[in-house]
Amino acid sequence: MVAAIWTIILSGFAYNNVNKYLAGQLSYPWIVPIHAAFFFAWLAFLAVQTLLVRRDQAATHRRLGIFGAGLASAMVLLGVATAIVTERLKFGTPAADTRFLSVMFADMLVFGSLVAAGMIARNRPAAHKRLMLLSTVLLTDAGFGRWLSHRLAAALGNRNFWEIQTLADGAWPFVSFQLLPMYALVAVIGLYDLLTRKRLNPAYLAAVAWSIPIHLLAGWLYFQPFWLTAAARIIGR
C-alpha cells in the first residue's frame, strides 16, 4: 500500500508538472515547494516506519513516532495555508477555483484527525497501523486528481468535473472524480482484512465512517453559492 501511495502521488504530480512546463506555466508561490517538501517527508516517514516494523525494530519505530506527530501537525498547517495562499493568488484568473477550498480543508481535517487517532492508539498495533495508513491513503486524491481521475471520469461517461456548476449535475461527477479512486484503495485495505482475518478492524470501520461524511460534506459545500462567498472571504478577497 505504501508503494501504491508513492506511485499515485509521484505519477500524478509528475504528469501535472510536465504539462505545466510544456505550457510554460510551471510557476508556484513560495509556500508550495515548502508544502511539497513536508508532504514528501511524510511519505518517506511512512515508508521508513513500515520498514522498521517489518524488520522487527519496533523500539526505533516508536521513538520516531514523536517526530511523525510533529511532521503531521506541520503538514496540516501548511496544507491549509497553501490552499489559502494559492487560491488568493489565482483569484480572478481562469485558474481560480476558490470553492475547492472545501475539498482541501476536508483532506487536512481527515488526515490530521486520523493521525491523531493513530497516535492515541499507539499501544494497539492493529488499530494504529490502519489509522496511520488510512490517513495517508485519503490524501491520494491529490495524485489521482492530477492524472487518473480524469481518465476514470471519461470512462464513466462524465463531463469534465471542473465544468460542473450545480449539485444536481455534479454530485456523481464529484464522487467519481474526487472520491472513487482513493476510496477504492481504502476498500482494498478492508478486503485484505476480510480475506486474512475474516473481519474488519473496528479502527478501520470508525475511520471510514468518520471520513466519508466529511468528504461528502466538502463536495456538497463545493456546489453551494454561499460557500463561494465564504471561501472568498477566507482568502481575503
Image: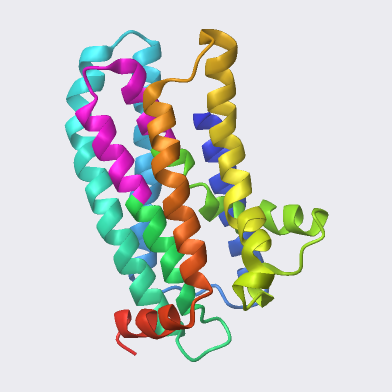
Find the magenta span and give its range: 110-134
Dominant secondary structure of the residues highlighted in magenta in the image: helix
Frontmost residue, 40 versus 70: 70
Q: Quadrant of the C terminus?
A: bottom left
In-front residue for pair 212/74: 212
Q: Measured along the vertical axis of the image, is residue 156 above or below residue 208?
A: below
Asked whether 51 or 122 is in front, the reply is: 122
Q: Please name the residue shown 24% across and 52% down the image.
A: 74
Q: Is 229 rendered above or below residue 76?
A: below
Location of residue 205 by image quarter: top left
Residue 47 visible from this viewpoint: no
Image point (32%, 64%), residue name:
80
| Residue 112 lies in the magenta stretch | yes
Residue 94 left/right relative to 231: right
Does the magenta run of residues contain 130? yes
Identify whether 172 is placed above or below 161. above
Q: Position of residue 200 (x, y in %)?
A: 48, 20
